[in-house]
Image (cartoon, rainbow, N blue to C red):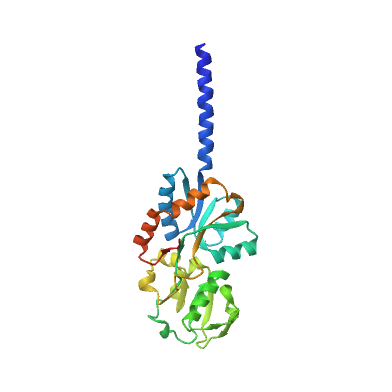
Amino acid sequence: MQRRIILKLAAVFGAAALVTNLAYAGDSIKVGVTGGPHAQIMEIVKQVAATNGLDIKIIEFSDYVQPNAALASGDLDANSYQHAPYLDAQVKDRGYKLIKIAETVTFPMGIYSKKIKSLAQLPDGARIAVPNDPTNGGRALLLLQKNGLLKLRADAGLKATPLDIVDNPKKLKIVELDAAQIPRSLSDVDAAAINTNFAMEAGLKPKQDAIAIEDPHGPYANIIAIRAVDKDKPWVAKLVAAYHSAQVKQFIEGKYAGAVTAAW
């Protein structure tokens, strides 16, 4: 009789452990980020999410291409590093079944230089580095246009390329580089358009060091992306709630002093 009771109890506890493990597996996710603010903010999101039973493993990447490839292949459950126009371009160009689930933060792009103190000092024929991906490259060209350095075709849109330049009075030479590499190449060019996350990772301070900076209220709010098939999974709502929490917003406001702003 005693042996029978022990076996029954073992079966009950074994089933309970199985259920617990399954529940934990469902609430444990991998989120891809790029270094700098995205990674730092996600650490706070991780802490908040843990209080709601969601375990987040943060995977850090050094470029803009791999986080979407890893998400599409199932190596990640979500990523947080890109703005909506970039995701839209990736979905169109690569056929990814990825969707936006929430806005996160805005990083105004800036123009930086180690050789000049203002755009007025740019010499004729100056070399300007811009990101080589379509959306961030277009973003950089629009910033140069806004500051009167060149003119783009009227219908160039957010994905403008150097081929869309119709007026270039200073004969500027546009140098297209991987976005993550531009800060390291700053000494090799006269000026560079750098995404704020990569600028800050390189020790640049947008408010003090940028000689021109983007309006933060544009179309470039960053987002959390997931696979479309996962949109109704319980962890999705938990992830968004954690990111949009008061604790995370307070961290962003205190840490970045306006260089990074909450987009929700």
Asked whether 87 or 60 is in front, the reply is 87
Asked whether 96 or 237 is in front, the reply is 237
- Which quarter of the rendering shows the C terminus? bottom left
Q: Is residue 176 above or below residue 124?
A: above
Question: Residue most toward the top?
Answer: 1
| Tally of marks | 0
- Provide residue 88's location: percent of width, then percent of height: 59, 64
Q: Quadrant of residue 90?
A: bottom right
Q: Residue at x 42, y 56 (%)?
A: 41
Q: Residue at x 53, y 14 (%)?
A: 4
Q: Residue at x 36, y 57 (%)?
A: 250
- Provide residue 106's location: percent of width, then percent of height: 45, 65
Horizontal relation, residue 43 to residue 233: left or right? left
- Provide residue 178's location: percent of width, then percent of height: 53, 68
- Provide residue 28's location: percent of width, then percent of height: 50, 44
Looking at the image, can residue 227 be seen?
yes
Asked whether 48 or 140 is in front, the reply is 48
Q: Is residue 105 above or below residue 134?
A: above
Horizontal relation, residue 78 to residue 202: left or right? right
Looking at the image, can residue 160 be seen?
no
Q: Is residue 29 above or below residue 162?
A: above
